[in-house]
Amino acid sequence: MLTIATEVPLARYSTMRLGGSAAFAVAVSDAQQAAQACRWAMDHGLPFIVVGSGSNIVWRDEGFEGLLIVNRISGYEEVAQPDGSVLVTAGAGENWDTVVERSAASGLTGIEALSLIPGTAGATPVQNVGAYGQDVSQTLVSVQAYDSQTGAMVSISNQECRFGYRASRFKSDDRGRFVITSVSFRLGWGSIQPPYYRALQAYMDEHGSTDTSPASIRQAVISIRSDKLPDPAKVANNGSFFANPIVSQEVFDTIARTLPELEIPHWPADGGIKLSAAWLLDQAGFKDYHDTATGMATWHRQPLVLVNEHAADTAGLLVFRDSIITAVADRFGVSLQQEPELLPVTA
Ligand code: EPU
């Protein structure tokens, strides 16, 4: 039996805590309920949107004239494989950090650097969550889901997810098609190997730590993140608000030529040069920036994180966002892309 609520404030389902309301909302706790909820929406001629904990979602002020499906599917299982690895399967509604905590406590390596990332397990493949040198595409085996197009439960392999940097088919071509019910990872015994991500290496050097066990890396990542990023339970935010832009070598050379006085942080990346969005914001004057007009700010320890201090609505957030995009484009000719999803896709 589904219990469908009406006129539900969407701010509850976004860690930015802004947005209008959903005409209908339902929480689902197993795959069968997820399928039922989709069918209910389709039978009523309504669109549906599935959410986990809303840590990467910005809701429009206009709200959503459809069914919000809140994924509360739980479960955690470790199954030893013949090759010595362990298949970890987590319900899509499980808190992601709890999944990381459990697997690291079991001594399993593969997702420990993804500690303390807010959100649910089922949300991780959508944007190929990554941090400190790991991303879920490196260990994910399959995504189990309800396919609303065919009405079938399906298993989607890693390759079929079409992962890219902060990208997958769930966020592009097949946005809104699947309800992810569980996610499986192949984890191993042992530990991550050098070279370590810069911030991680710096932490280990500073603490004279040589222990690279999953539990120890997890503790290091938790320290680094808690020091740099706001806790979404206390400060309304969506983590990194912009993706790190990837530009062509020519564009990079032009920027470097135009601004010879700057040492521009950059890294080779698929198809070009990756720039640091945090650095671009910093240089454009947005470090620890508090905008009284919109009630928005940038986090003092990491400008890439936009925080809602006392914004009245999403419109204010969007004005603030656009002022940053414009300033960075004016200074560097680079166009920043918003990383959290603005939903519904069209108002
Ligand atoms: N920087 C500055 N000024 C600052 C802070 C940072 O110039 O005030 C520059 C530095 O050059 C630094 C660089 O930004 O080296 C990169 O910073 P950091 O290592 O913190 O990583 P990031 O690229 O800003 C990405 C992810 C984070 C993830 C971290 C750690 C994106 C968009 N963001 O941030 O993910 O935690 O790496 O791996 O890829 C998220 O997606 O919500 C998120 C927090």
Image (cartoon, rainbow, N blue to C red):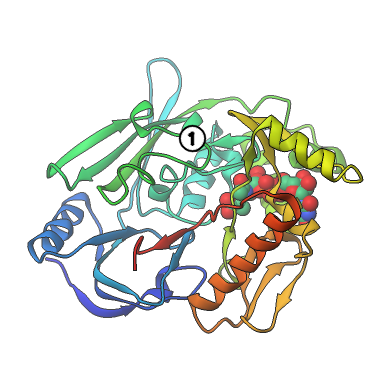
Where residue 11 sits: x, y (%)? Answer: 43, 75
Quarter of the figure with the N terminus: bottom left
Task: Give whichever of 26, 237 is nearer the camera.
Answer: 237
> Which residue is at 51% across, 44% downward?
129
Q: Within 8 Å: ligand 1 and the Cβ of disc 1? A: no
For residue 305, side relative to residue 111 (left or right): right
Task: Give whichever of 263, 27 is nearer the camera.
Answer: 263
Where residue 263 sits: x, y (%)? Answer: 87, 42
The amino acid marked with disc number 1 is Gly
Where residue 197 sits: x, y (%)? Answer: 72, 35
Q: Is residue 15 visible?
A: yes
Pick out the residue farthest to the right: 261
Q: Is 296 placed above or below 174 here? A: below
> Which residue is at 83% across, 44% downward?
258
Where residue 262 sits: x, y (%)? Answer: 88, 45
**Figure label count:** 1
SS at mark 1 in the image: loop
Q: Is residue 227 visible?
A: no
> Which residue is at 30% across, 78% downward?
8
Pick out the residue farthest to the top: 83
Q: Is 277 placed above or below 253 here? A: below
Residue carrying label 1: 164
Quarter of the figure with the C terminus: bottom left
For residue 29, side relative to residue 307 (left or right): left
Count neighbours of disc 1 (C-alpha within 10 A) and say few if under 14, some if 14 to 19, many if 20 or more.
Answer: few
Q: Is 338 placed above or below 257 here? A: below
